Image (cartoon, rainbow, N blue to C red):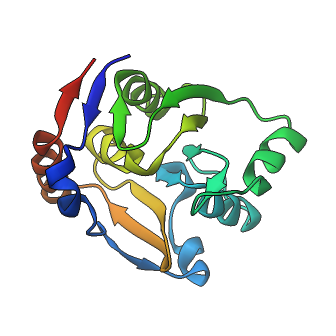
Amino acid sequence: MSGRRIPEGRRDFFKEPLGTDLDETELKQHNAAKMITVGDVVSLTVRRNGMTPLLSIYDGYTERHEMTGFATYVESHGLEEKVIVNPAGTVTCELEDAIRNAITGETGIIRVEGEEDLAVMPCILNAPDGYDIIYGWPGKGMMCVTTDEHIRKRVKELWNMMEDFE
């Protein structure tokens, strides 16, 4: 497995949220066909609001506690998912490829064994302009970042701070 990881001395650069706060009441203002959710609670919240995003990425945990609400939803609705291994603090090539493939029409749910927190980055880098990436921010709630060249440039700067790993 290979990919990118955050070097120890650069973790603080990755602690700033991208985008803006999003209240659950604002979800209906967004187009589900151009929506990607990252995180268990966010993915479940969007589905419970009657919306099916293009892609949902989750790991079965919320703030380090097992949270099976979305996993139960996926299972009880018989939804197909792709399972990817992705260790904490990394974006594996396998995860990046799965995100790219999902955006172009493959499986719309990715379950990460490990951690999905950094999946927001390849979502932003690979989604066309005008897509909403909605993700959970511990202690704050939901955040929304809309893809455009400006946010892609910011994420590429962060991406370039990461190091390759084998």
Residue 164 percent across, percent down from the top left: 19, 26
Residue 163 percent across, percent down from the top left: 16, 33
Residue 11 percent across, percent down from the top left: 23, 56
The residue depicted at 52 percent of the width and 74 percent of the height is: 29
Visible residue check, residue 61: yes
The residue depicted at 60 percent of the width and 44 percent of the height is: 59
Q: Nearer the viewer, residue 164 or 45?
A: 164
Visible residue check, residue 105: no
> Viewed as shown, does residue 20 lie left or right of 57?
left
> Viewed as shown, does residue 26 lie left or right of 69?
left
Choose top left, top right, bottom left or bottom right for residue 97: top left
Residue 152 percent across, percent down from the top left: 18, 50
**Figure quadrant of the C terminus:** top left
The residue depicted at 17 percent of the width and 61 percent of the height is: 13
> Viewed as shown, does residue 49 lie left or right of 113?
right
Choose top left, top right, bottom left or bottom right for residue 1: top left
Choose top left, top right, bottom left or bottom right for residue 47: bottom right
